[in-house]
């Protein structure tokens, strides 16, 4: 089946969050969140080598909205339920629709860190992947030195499946190991 023909909602809800696909009107709030959190993002995320301006953010949101509708990439923004306050971002990134398998990525706005929002959104997105998209496998990958990011899959019962040596390069140029955590449908 063509993934673009799979119908599903553009938003999910968890206890405290509305998890939805990006909209062009999210640019200002996303820009503020990235600016507030940039020092953390720059350490771990390849796209955060330089602070994006509002025009780049707007283009990003437009491209991710189109990708969401075409089912090429399912980026989600995380908002406090009932508000337009951005908590962070996540995604269910298709790696292979034929299996189907996906990768979850995430980051949290500085003022909302250590409050369980990323764990909560990862549970909701995983359930969506397994129950609505019939995922057979969901992965979470992270830098082996990113201890905070590793806590999420470990807490949620993802299995550390592999350590890929010298597989990624940090924004500062260092070679790093990548950890691959996975959860499969039967687990």
Image: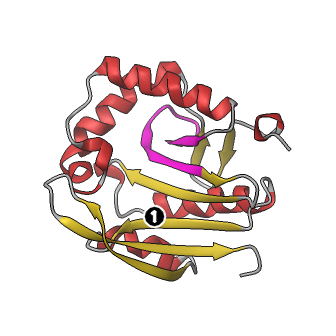
Along the line of sight, the residue nearer the viewer: 85 or 128: 128
Query: Helix, strand or loop at disc 1?
Result: loop
Quadrant of the image containing the N terminus: top right
Q: Position of residue 154 (x, y in %)?
A: 48, 80
Left or right of 157: which side holds 7?
Answer: right
Neighbourhood count class around disc 1 (C-alpha, 10 Å): few under 14, some 14–19, many 20 upward: few
Tell me where residue 123 sits by quadrant. bottom right
Which residue occupies the foreground of this view, 32 or 153? 153
Judge whether 28 appears above or below 126 on screen: above
Residue nearest the viewer, comparing 34 with 73: 73
Q: Residue at x 54, y 58 (%)?
A: 104
Secondary structure mostly seen in the magenta stretch: strand
Residue at the image position 51 percent from the left and 22 percent from the top: 62
Q: Magenta stretch containing residue 137, yes or no?
A: no
Q: Dot 1 corresponds to which residue?
A: 116
Q: Nearer the viewer, residue 76 or 184?
A: 184
User: Where is residue 78 shown, x and y percent of the image?
Assistant: 51, 44
Identity of the residue drawn at 56% across and 58% down: 103
Left or right: 55, with 180 as reference point: left
| Magenta-colored span | 73-93
Taking 63 as reference, is 174 left or right?
Answer: left
Side of 86 relative to 8 (left or right): left
Q: Quadrant of the C terminus?
A: bottom right
Counting from the top left corner in percent of width and height, residue 50 is at 20, 36
Residue in the image at 68% along x and 30% along y:
69
């Amino acid at each position: 089946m063509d993934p673009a023909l799979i119908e599903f909602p553009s938003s999910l809800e968890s206890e405290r969050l509305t998890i939805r696909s990006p909209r062009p009107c999210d640019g200002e709030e996303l820009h503020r969140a990235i600016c507030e959190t940039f020092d953390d993002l720059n350490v771990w995320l390849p796209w955060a080598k330089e602070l994006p301006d509002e025009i780049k953010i707007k283009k990003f949101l437009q491209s991710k909205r189109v990708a969401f509708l075409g089912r090429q990439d399912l980026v989600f923004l995380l908002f406090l339920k009932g508000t337009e306050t951005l908590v962070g971002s996540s995604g269910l990134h298709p790696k292979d629709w034929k299996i189907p398998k996906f990768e979850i990525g995430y980051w949290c706005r500085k003022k909302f860190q250590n409050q369980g929002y990323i764990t909560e959104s990862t549970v909701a997105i995983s359930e969506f992947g397994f129950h609505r998209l019939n995922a057979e496998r969901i992965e979470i990958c992270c830098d082996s030195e990113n201890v905070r990011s590793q806590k999420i899959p470990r807490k949620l019962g993802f299995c550390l499946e592999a350590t890929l040596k010298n597989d990624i390069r940090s924004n500062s140029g260092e070679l790093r190991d990548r950890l691959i955590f996975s959860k499969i449908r039967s687990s």
